[in-house]
Image (tube, rainbow, N blue to C red):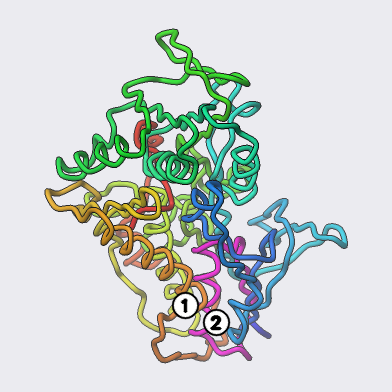
Amino acid sequence: MQHRIIVLGAGYTGASAAGRLARRLRREDTAITLVNAEPDFVERVRNHELAAGRRLRHRPLAEMLAGTGVELRIARVTAVDVDRRTVTVRDADGEGELEYDTLVYALGSGWNDRGVPGAAEHAHEIAGRGGALRVRERLALLEAGQRVVVVGGGLTGLEAATEIAEARPDLEVALAARGGLGDWLSPRGRGHLRKVFDRLGVTVHEHVDVTAVHADRVTTADGVSLPAALTVWTTGFAVHPIARATALETTGTGQIVVDRTMRSVSHPEVYAVGDAAMVRGPGDKPLRMSCASGTPTAWQAADSIAARLTGGKLPDVTIRYFNQCVSLGRKEGLIQYVTADDRSVNAALTGRFAALYKELVCKGAAWAVAHPTLGLPARRRAVRAAATAAPADPVATGATAAPAAPADAARPATGTAA
């Protein structure tokens, strides 16, 4: 009987995990199913480009996963029962159940309106492809001189504001940030950021807290109204709600608590990766929601599952950071080098070389989804007959993650940092 592995979500992490598992395990021993609501792979790190009007490459998942042995199921996940080991999905033919022996939960996250009055009704998000396309449509309808307000001074906000300003120089673009502009960057990084914002004519409202969104403006905590024909909301991410509705141990923000091998601390047959998982990195700090964090967790989970099923050695890799990659339009960029625990150092790459660097990172991330072992020789191994969920391993239990407080809203995490 084949060991049934179901992967939920085909973003960077889910698609990478599914492909890597298929390259690690013999096809006659395993049945790997990747469930995703859409037939195409979405380059989330490029959503600000899509929103600003740029046409992106079409990437059908079926083509990207061709030859991997992964079965693609286009359906929306509506429930997970971790006690019965079933996933309820809905597709064009109705609702059905899938049974699993091992589950990889990679449903990711969406935008977070933080409960601000009017945000859900009047603001637009770019966390998903649908939201980015709606922003694109709204921008196309705006006339010269009208104002776009981007709320959120994190990486996504910086990229959205500069991309829109470059694509539509006839519009007034403003950024509303709870902190200072790029206040976590090095002096060189902050200086370059201000230079680019000034050149593009982006107005910056620093140290403001947006407390309400209306159809034609946003208001701040000190009572100031900022006119806005279009409000783009980029104040961080909220994880998919399904995990919290299960018996899995989750944090207060709904992330699944995992050990160092990405395995659930409450249900060992379940693994969580990417934004859906509470993972701690160097200094015991929670990893931010980003592609840079998510892809290594997918590799860690896939290699851990393969090791447990085949009797191999468990990976014991600490996930760390090297830099934050920020595009500032198509011609400018900023690569802020950081410590292992994501603190800025006094080194940064700026200008066209930084823009090229960021472009290579984006292309590389998509390439890695279609090439989950990064071009290394495949080593498919036989699954042991008695391979089942085993008691926790010492390497895993030595660093069990604990619930963490929500990230600082002044620095919303994004999927665009490396």
Query: x%, y% of residue 101?
Result: 62, 71
Question: Residue at (61%, 73%) from the top-left corner?
Answer: 5
Instruction: Read off the residue under disc 1.
Output: 372
Q: Quadrant of residue 354?
A: bottom left
Secondary structure beneath disc 1?
A: loop
Secondary structure beneath disc 2?
A: helix
* Quarter of the N terminus within the rendering: bottom right
| 1 and 2 marks in contact (CB < 8 Å) | yes
Left or right for 351, reference 248? left
Query: x%, y% of residue 119?
Result: 58, 26
Category of crowding for the residue at label 2, using alpha-carbon neighbours closer than 10 angstroms: few (below 14), some (14–19), many (at least 20):
many
Left or right for 7, reference 160? right
Category of crowding for the residue at label 1, using alpha-carbon neighbours closer than 10 angstroms: few (below 14), some (14–19), many (at least 20):
many
Question: Residue at (35%, 60%) from the top-left corner?
Answer: 358
Question: Residue at (27%, 28%) from the top-left corner?
Answer: 180
Instruction: Read off the residue under disc 2.
Output: 22
Q: Is residue 185 above or below residue 233?
A: below
Q: Which mark is residue 17?
A: none
